Amino acid sequence: MRRARKATQEQVNVESGILHGLQTVLTKTKNMKLKLLILLAISSVAYTQQITIGDNAGDVTFEEYNPKSTLVVDANVPTRAKFPFIDVHNHQWSMDTKASLDGLIEDMDSLNMRVMVNLSGRGWTREVDKSTAILESYIGAVNENYPDRFVIFTNIDFNDIDKPGWTERAVKMLEDDVKRGAKGLKIYKSLGFSVTNSDGSIVAVDDARIDPVWAKAGELGIPVLIHTADPAPFWDPLNAMNERWLELKTHPRRKKDASKGDYSWEELIEQQHNVFRKNKNTTFIAAHMGWYPNNLPKLDSILTEMPNVMVEIGAVIAELGRQPRAANKFFTKWQDRVLFGKDSWKPEEYETYFRVLETEDEYFRYHKKYHAYWPMYGLGLSDTVLKKLYYKNALRIIPGLDASAFPE
């Protein structure tokens, strides 16, 4: 690789002046040979401007650029939550033995996590018999070893949704799973993305064939945690204006394109809201704050309109941490409607959540640059709000939890 040359600022200014002059002449001349010569000259000067004051610094890419802040501020990094908490958004794929649960308990205790909600109760298989066996093994191991520390949600099998009798089978499966010990229902984002009819058409989130499932969840008194869509910029053009450019560059499969058959972001969100509106007797938990953590005024209007909707903060803490005053006001106003959730199970990342929620620290980084390249600030939530966020709200909506394990 060619070594970047050193230059003074005076040299840079001179070259910039030359480049501007050549560009001016180019726009005025009609002589094609002269135009060609000028274009070659512009290319030469432009190349020389790929310089910096310092060797090799020009080789640093945006992905690599990660400056160390010179800001001197207090740093309070809590490795344990201030209060015992319930994580309502977790995914585990091995919970069928005491040994697997022992390992989870050790990490949970270190974090002060009192209860983990595993949303993936039926595992990750398209075969109903196998998924039923997985659910039964998880619930059996939990009941035998740590009945007060884990909650299992079930899932819906959308295979063959357009075949006769699917709705009745889905409702029966939900009823049976609650009898087995499931405490809630998780709907993956595949509904609206990859769940299709036999002709290949995508099944909408508010498809009428699913309506009896939502209604049955309400009758059974269990919450439905539903993940619909993804961050809105995933649908936007992939250019310098896209705030998720780095994430989409490093994870290109996350890019969405409504022109190629995907539902638009707006369509998916509206479909989800239609479900909420049609099923007022069912409690819904909108995953990832309904993908409105960056638009709290809009989320405020949604919660005002739909009293049966809760939200959880999984994977969106970086959005909250860059607007600490607005987020504090939002959490204070809606303290009865927000739940703690993390999503991916990486114990070392929980301290980021604790720091944003509990402290008033300033200008600190998120643990994944491709999610958030901006610094965050602590919200400094009150103990009253923290207790509701960490456990009181979950105790209210998830059946069968032992409230005696938590403070008043």
Image (cartoon, rainbow, N blue to C red):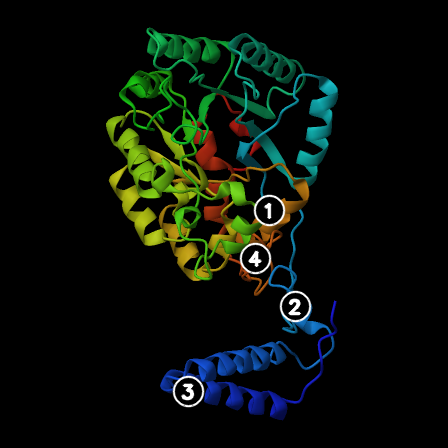
How far from the left and from the top, in percent, is residue 216?
A: 34, 16
Instruction: Give the mark, 4 or 1, whose residue is nearer the N terminus.
Output: 1
Distance from disc 4 to disc 3, alpha carbons, whole Å, reads: 55 Å
For residue 342, say whether it is visible.
Answer: yes
Observer-side mark, 3 or 2, equals 3
**Left-right relation of 368 to 242:** right
Distance from disc 3 to disc 2, alpha carbons, whole Å, reads: 37 Å
Distance from disc 2 to disc 1, alpha carbons, whole Å, reads: 31 Å
Residue on which disc 1 sits: 82
Marks 4/1 in contact by CB < 8 Å: the verdict is: no
SS for dot 2: loop
Residue on which disc 3 sits: 24
How far from the left and from the top, in percent, is residue 261?
A: 36, 35
Query: Which quadrant of the view contains residue 266?
Result: top left
SS for dot 4: loop
Marks 1/3 in contact by CB < 8 Å: the verdict is: no
Say what amino acid the circle numbered 3 marks: Thr
Instruction: Give the mark, 4 or 3, whose residue is nearer the N terminus.
Output: 3
The quadrant of the rendering that contains the N terminus is bottom right
Q: Which mark is residue 67?
A: 2
Q: Is residue 33 above or below residue 190?
A: below
Q: Residue at x 57, y 10 (%)?
A: 130
Q: Residue at x 68, y 86 (%)?
A: 7
Say what amino acid the circle numbered 2 marks: Pro
SS for dot 1: loop
Question: Around disc 1, counting alpha carbons within 10 Å, would you say few (fewer than 14), some (14 to 19), or many (20 or more)?
Answer: some
Distance from disc 2 to disc 4, alpha carbons, whole Å, reads: 24 Å
Marks 2/1 in contact by CB < 8 Å: the verdict is: no
Residue on which disc 4 sits: 359
